[in-house]
Amino acid sequence: MAAGRHEVTVNGTARSLAGTDPATSALDFLRAQGLTGAKEGCAEGECGACAVLVLRPDGVGRGGAGADGGTDGSDGTAGADLGRSRWTGVNACLVPAAALDGQEVLTAEGLGTPDALHPVQHELAVRGGSQCGYCTPGFVCAMAAEYYRGDRHPHAVPDREHGPNGFDLHALSGNLCRCTGYRPIRDAAFALGAPEAGDPLASRATHPPPAAPPSRLEGASGAFERATDLSRLLTLLREHPDAVLVAGATDWGVEVNLRGARARLAVGIDRVHELRALHVGHDAVEIGASLTLSEVGRALAGRVPLLDQLLPQFASPLIRNGATLGGNLATASPVGDAAPALLALEADVVLACAGGERTVPLSGYFTGYRRTVRRPDEVIRAVRIPLPLSGVTAFHKVAKRRFDDISSVAAGIALDVRDGVVAKARIGLGGVAATPVRALATEAALEGRPWTAEVVRAAAQVMGREGTPIDDHRASAAYRSAMLGTALLRLHAEADPSLAPAVAP
């Protein structure tokens, strides 16, 4: 196995990783280098004070695309590098420094200087959006990622969340400080123009990102190895069944920071090419387990509407730029947002080991609180969603904050309504049991019945009794039950009226 370079390019300068412990976060590594703009606020990826930019591939294409780029429904493969890069905002407090071996990182210090401010820094300064200064560098990096977004174009009809310059304010939803008020920050974002010709950072994004060869870093706490092919990954799992698999580290990074967790061997799987493919065929959509949620959203581009409803509610862009479907299912959290939607989509989990692959329905994947059927020598290779999709879908999430929060309860709903009758119902629930569950009784209460307000009200009462919700610091059991029924009533109220049975004159 190649040893890797054991260095990371930061603001254009190579910085050695030699002597860096594998448990060291990118944030601590950068601050030890004297780059103290990025700060630690929450140490769990919520506040965005630690945000930096990493150069990532901008090339997860659409599976099943024809020569003109349009989806034609034929078998296809996506995930190949299309020759461009994207400056991607991430939470440096979560990413292991070892995972950045050979990569390019940009901090707020690398965007501009006091004598030559970057446009983002300038607009924040002159419009009073610099706040107390603690969180500002994180805002600067998240705003710069949106500034350099290649498909950012003037917005035809500006609204409260999209500026006339095409700036999407959701890009800042992972930066939580608002001590100057949000308006100056919004004004700064909406005042940004396009990068000037010759902007070196914009020019860099027109070329491929740095390669990510296999690498290994060892230290007092253990070792971190980046695998780049499935064969090596499965060998490591066979030899080290207690190895921790790390894609975006949005879960593992929290364990390391807040609970002092350490691993004798952590295996980086975010560049395993077999886990980064996306296929759209005639009978299924297959999503590689190590594609980030941001990549999945861009690649599918509306192909799976229920995921389009899920993804904007999944944490923040800074988290979605690292989090993966494989990681979300592997943690088996009963409040993980992906599982309810994927249960409604009747998804399968494709598990791979040295002896081959097996496919497990997601409805049979969870066995208990944070337990699954996945063996220590197995890795989630992909999530497979069967086609065709149901025509009426919804993802409802109840949380204390609209964005960037863990759900108190979540429901994914997918219905086939034909001639005003519910032909099929699939409903996944989170936050109401020790595992994500299917709402089987509610499905039975809907199937074969007319899609009417009366039937839906009756089914909503059944749905309110699904699962075994508990009282905790996020919500009471009674509140969770009430919200379940409300989700179904809301879907009916918002659904296309043409789906309802015809009323005789």
Image (tube, rainbow, N blue to C red):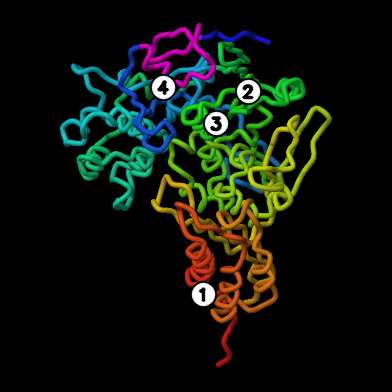
Closer to the chain start, of discs 2 and 3, is: 3
Amino acid carrying label 4: it is Leu
Closer to the chain start, of discs 1 and 2, is: 2
The residue shown at (43%, 9%) is: 15
**What is the distance, in whole Å, between disc 1 and disc 2 at their CAs?**
50 Å
The residue shown at (44%, 13%) is: 9
**What is the distance, in whole Å, between disc 3 and disc 4 at their CAs?**
15 Å
Is residue 458 shown left or right of residue 486?
A: right
4 and 2 marks in contact (CB < 8 Å):
no
Q: Which residue matches tag 3? A: 252
Disc number placed over residue 497 in the picture, else none? 1
Closer to the chain start, of discs 1 and 3, is: 3
The span shown in magenta is 7-33
**What is the distance, in whole Å, between disc 1 and disc 4 at their CAs?**
51 Å
Amino acid carrying label 1: it is Pro
**Membership of 27 in magenta stretch:** yes
Q: Nearer the viewer, mark 1 or mark 4?
A: 4
